[in-house]
Image: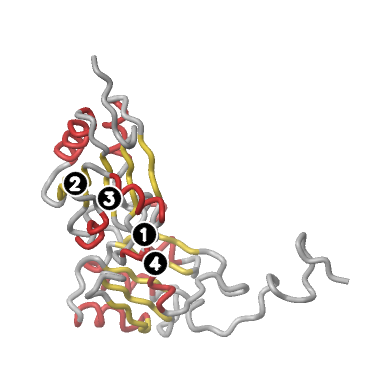
Amino acid sequence: MEKIERMDNKISFIGAGPGDPELLTLKALKKIKIADVIIWTDSLIPEKILDFAKEGSEKIKTSSLNLEQITSIMIKKFQAGKTVIRLHDGDPCLFGAIKEQIEILKKEKIEIEVIPGVSAFQVAAAYHEAELTIPDVTQTIILTRAGGRTGMPKKESLKDLAKHNSSLCLYLSARHVKRSQETLLEFYPPETKVIVGFRVSWDDGWTSLIELKDMANFSIEKKLIRTTIYIISPAINTSQNRSNLYNPSYKHLFRNNK
């Protein structure tokens, strides 16, 4: 049997970032440029990300496909000698449902790699020049979602997570914003700053800085139901003590104070 040659002998799951093509990693960009087949989450990734694809590449949308249909296409194209990549929005390890896809592909003895991407919470925070880990305020970031059609483990209820009063990033929760706000107000002051991001870094995307007490009304007013992130944090717009990192009196391995 003649050996099939391809540019890449594995299927790559690639984090395409939140939308801005300039936020693709160099590794992701390289993979997009050489791919014969690009299978992409078209409901969550702007089409201009595919502008980097080579001429003649096949681009397959997945918004109307189920798991078996997606993986069947990937297997067929790969076994036909094509270089296949799977584009996910943001970072694949966050709410990407990649594990179930990878398990099916591995049963077919197909090698896999996962390439990380920039997540929406990072970009939204950057837009507002926010540091989410301020000494003596919070050193913890929680990435989670409100419970809905996708079940949440009991030990990870929003109430349990909010008790930490840390920086909390809510994905996939715009439809449940009223209930989420009520829970958060049990543990965070009403004036706590919240960054709201919609389609962060898309051409029509935006972010706003509001207060927690206004989160539900603001979301309803803006008709937010999807592609929305909330960052609730006592670290946003707070005064801070100087960190040890650049303190001239603080000694560490790379700074020998005399």
> Residue 33: where, in percent of width, then height?
30, 50
Image quarter hosting the N terminus: top left
Q: Is residue 194 left or right of residue 33?
A: right
- Which residue is label 3 attached to? 87
Residue 57 screen position, x and y as percent: 19, 46
Instruction: Find the distance from the CA under tag 3 to the CA under tag 1.
Output: 11 Å
Gap in Å between the C-alphas at discs 1 and 2? Answer: 19 Å
Which residue is pictured at 35% across the width and 36% down the height? 112
In the picture as drawn, the residue positioned furthest to the right comes out as 258
Q: Find residue 77 and report its image quarter.
A: top left
Q: CA distance from mark 2 to mark 4?
A: 31 Å
Name the residue rendered at 24%, 18% in the picture.
Answer: 2
Earlier in the chain: of badge 3 and badge 4, it is 3
Report the mark closest to the observer, 1 or 2: 2
* Residue type, mark 1 in image: Leu
User: Quick check: 151 above or below 207?
Assistant: above
Q: Which residue is mark 2?
A: 57
2 or 4: tag closer to the N-terminus: 2
Tell me which numbered mark, 1 or 4, is placed earlier along the sequence.
1
Amino acid under label 3? Leu
